[in-house]
Image (cartoon, rainbow, N blue to C red):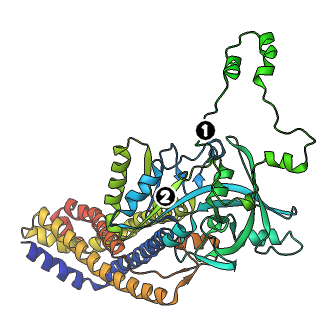
Amino acid sequence: MNTLIATIAWRSLREHRAKTVIVGTLLAIGMLVLVVGNSLMDSAAQGIERLYIQNFTGHLMISGAAPGRLTMFGYQDMTAMDRAIPLVPAYAELLDFLHDQPYTAAASPQGTGFALAEARGDARTPVSLFGIEPAAYQDAFPNNIRLTAGRFLEPGETGVLLSATAAEFLNERLEAPLETGDKLLLTSLSTIGGMRIREVPVVGMYAFHHSNPQLDMVSLVDITTLRALSGMALTRVEPGELSPEQQRVFEIQEVDELFAQTDDFLVDVAEEGAAGEQDFLAILGPDTDAESALPDWQDPAAWHFVLLRLTDERYLYQARADIDAFFDARNVSGKVADWRQAAGPMADVSFGVRWAFNAVVLVIAVVAVIIIMNTLVISVTQRLSEFGTMRAIGAQKGFIRRMMLWEALLLSVISGAVGIAAGGVLLTLLRSQGIQAPNMFFEIIFGGSVLHPTLSWASVAVSLALLVAVAVVSSLYPTAIILNTPPVKAIHSE
């Protein structure tokens, strides 16, 4: 029965070629727009995902548990200065655990912070800082930077690898351009840790191969300096030993008695004499240039994140489950986030554009339904006598309804195939030439300066389903007109 109905529907489409071509062309154009548009969005989304995973975030970002949205740039809201970024719990054990897993390609610890960079007392610019372990960072992201001057940080070395954008901004305000070996004064400020200042040498300058406005301001710094600027400190405090007389001070109740016991409380100075400049400088602690070991007040396990890159994305869910189980077994609060959360607002911009595009497609689909429906109504009105004759010789309403449905399905599938073929040809041409991003906004959306789109078969399937739905919905009202018209009136409609 269905074969008979499909055959009649096909002959009907061939019989009314002019109307079939008009409606079919509209559907084919709609399919072309859907395939090309969705393929562009999918290619851009895949480009951004590949860009961040291979160059900045890895597949997973592991951190301490924290409320709100935490990215590799820190908190992305107005309370960022009021909240300390949590440290990775059980860091040493976690790193050993990750390196033992067969799906781990690389695991790079990282800290994050912000500072005001000052050069020669004449130029200042805000910078975002990534505190890194140089060897692990290069192992995780071996091809993400291009040195414009100097060299990369050495393990255990104090210094900053300054972003080319920040260096250019500073150079505009300096009489002579910055060079490697120059000192930068880094000042951080927060409501938690107050103001912290560190002076570090410029080891080199660099630019990311693929970047965006947020990444352009990132400079790489040794983790010791970042810990000092971010207040990731005072994790080890050695208890002091008090003499019996000094302990008695804490038991005094009266103020007069307190001052009466000062002789017992105070200790003699080892050497009397006038204090020199070096005596006062000693209060500030050892010279950072001469410091080769980690300061006593810093914890070598203090890191904000561990960025994990996998050997294959197929292990993504297993890795997340294993890390969650690791934290649960040790009763510590850890958190695992995907690359998109780690990337922050810039990745959201691209996905936001994709949602906007889908909203536009929805509006276009509604308009297409109306246009196609009107065209089908005109076609059906001219064919009323045909349908009236069919009903007069015994065709039931269900038969007419199925025949119209088959016409819509055949027309949409054929038109969809034409649209898919045209879209594939167009995308092949665009891929061979590339689409150059005209400005920074499109660079963010494309995940780079040039987009080479490919045909997305997922988009093809979704677009074809949407096209069939549009065709079927468009045929409902014309079908209702046919079924509600008495056969006698329909026969004499011409």
**Residue 344 seen anywhere in this rendered image of the structure:** no
Check disc 1 and report its element: helix, strand or loop.
loop
Give how far apart the Cα atoms at labels 1 and 2 are.
28 Å
| Quadrant assignment, res 419 | bottom left
User: Which residue is disc 2 drawn over?
Assistant: 306
The disc, 1 or 2, on the residue closer to the chain's N-terminal end is 1
The one nearer the camera, 472 or 436, is: 436
Image position of 453 with respect to 458: above or below: below
What amino acid is labelled 1 in the image? Glu
The one nearer the camera, 384 or 452, is: 452
What amino acid is labelled 2 in the image? Val
User: Which residue is disc 1 drawn over?
Assistant: 238
Check disc 2 and report its element: helix, strand or loop.
strand
Residue positioned 46% across, 65% down in the render = 58
Image position of 298 with respect to 391: above or below: above
Q: Quadrant of the C terminus?
A: bottom left
Residue positioned 76% across, 74% down in the render = 180
Residue positioned 70% across, 74% down in the render = 205
Q: Position of residue 440 (x, y in %)?
A: 64, 72
Q: Position of residue 250 (x, y in %)?
A: 68, 18
| Quadrant assignment, res 120 | bottom right
Q: Where is residue 70 in the image (x, y as percent from the top left)?
A: 53, 51
Q: How crowded is mark 1: few (under 14 residues within 10 Å), some or many (20 or more)?
A: few
Q: Are marks 1 and 2 in contact (CB under 8 Å)?
A: no
Q: Quadrant of the N terminus?
A: bottom left
Side of 425 relative to 288 (left or right): left
The one nearer the camera, 486 or 22, is: 22
| Quadrant assignment, res 186 | bottom right
